[in-house]
Amino acid sequence: MNTLTINNLNLTYKNGFQAIKDISLKIENGIFGLLGPNGAGKSSLMKTIVGLQKPTSGTITFNGINVSENPDHIKRNLGFLPQDFGVYPKVSAYDLLQHIALLKGISNNTELSSQILNLLEKVNLSDFKNKEVHTFSGGMRQRFGVAQALLGNPKIIIVDEPTAGLDPEERNRFNSLLSEISNDVIVILSTHLVEDVRNLCSDVAIINLGKLLTQGNPTELIAELENKIWSTPIEKNQLEDYQSRYRIISQQLIERELYITAFSEQPLPDFTSVNPLLEHVYFNTLTQNS
C-alpha cells in the first residue's frame, strides 16, 4: 500500500500570494479526486507534491520519506499525465515511448522493449504502435498519455483534467483504464468535472482559494444533503429576489427555462425536493465557504 501524507501545508509565493493554506490530507491506493474551480490552488498543490516547488511550511511524505528533503524519491516513483499532452510530429507511438523512457532515465534494453509493448496492449494501442502519435484522435492520445505515465512502474500518478475535449465513448474508455490501473497505485485526479469524480473516486477533496473545504467519500457526502436540496423554475428578473431570501447554490437553463437550486434544512415554499448529487455537494461547499 502506497501512502501520501500532507501535513499543515502552506505555500506563499515571493509576491506574497498564498496559494496553499494549511492543507492536510492522507491519500492511499485508488483514485483520489481533487475538485475545485480554476484558481483554486490545484496546480500549486500538484507541483508541491511532486517536488517542483518547496512549501513555505508543513510536510509532504510519500511512503514515509519527506518529499521536500528528497524530491528525487517521488520523481522516481511518479507518472504524470498533463491536460495537454504535446507530441513530436512524425514519431511513432513505440519510438516516442522509447524516447520518453530514456528521458526518464530508464535504460534502453530488452526489458524496456517488453514494457513498452505491454503498456501499448494495456491501453489498447498495440495495433497502432507504428502509427505517428500526432495523427491519433483525442481519446487515443490520452490513452497514449497513460502509457507514458506508466513507464517505469510508478507508484503515484497525477492526472490533470484528463477528459477535457473527449467524446462520451472515449471518455468512458479512458475512465475505465484509469480505474483499472488504480488498484496498485495512487492516482490523483485533478479536475473541475464533478461527474468524473463521482464515477471514479472513492475519496474526494474540494479546495478553493488554497483551502481544503471538505474531504470524504462521495456517497457519504451526498447522503449528508438528503432532503436539503430544493429546486424551482423562476423568471430571470426574479433571481435577485430569490438570492436575497434563500441560499441559492446553483442555477441552470433547462429547455430555456431558468431553474435555481437552493440548500435548506427545511422545505421551501414553491420549491421541489430533488435527490442530491455530487455537484450539489460541490456547489453547496463552495457557496458555504464563499
Image (cartoon, helix red, strand yellow):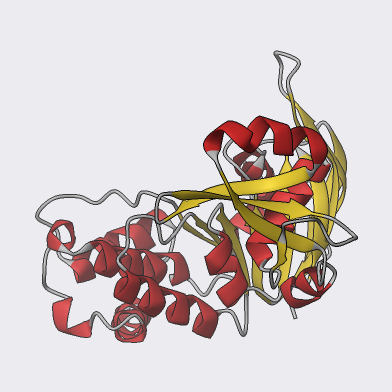
Percent position (x, y) of residue 75?
59, 55
The vertical placement of 58 against 269, above or below, is: above
Q: Nearer the viewer, residue 263 or 282?
A: 263
The answer to whether residue 157 is seen in the rendering is no
- Judge left or right: residue 192 versus residue 67: left
Residue beneath the point at 20% across and 65% down: 95
265 sits left or right of 158 in the view: right
- Report the residue at 9% width, 55% height from top: 90
Of the pair 254 and 224, the residue shown nearer to us: 254
Q: Position of residue 287 (x, y in %)?
A: 76, 42
Quadrant in the picture for the N terminus: bottom right
Give the residue drawn at x 18%, y 62%.
133
Asked whether, in this view, residue 235 is left or right of residue 101, the answer is right
Report x, y in % for residue 67.
Answer: 75, 51
Res. 288 visible in picture? yes
Q: Which image quarter is the C terminus in?
A: top right
Q: Quadrant of residue 127?
A: bottom left
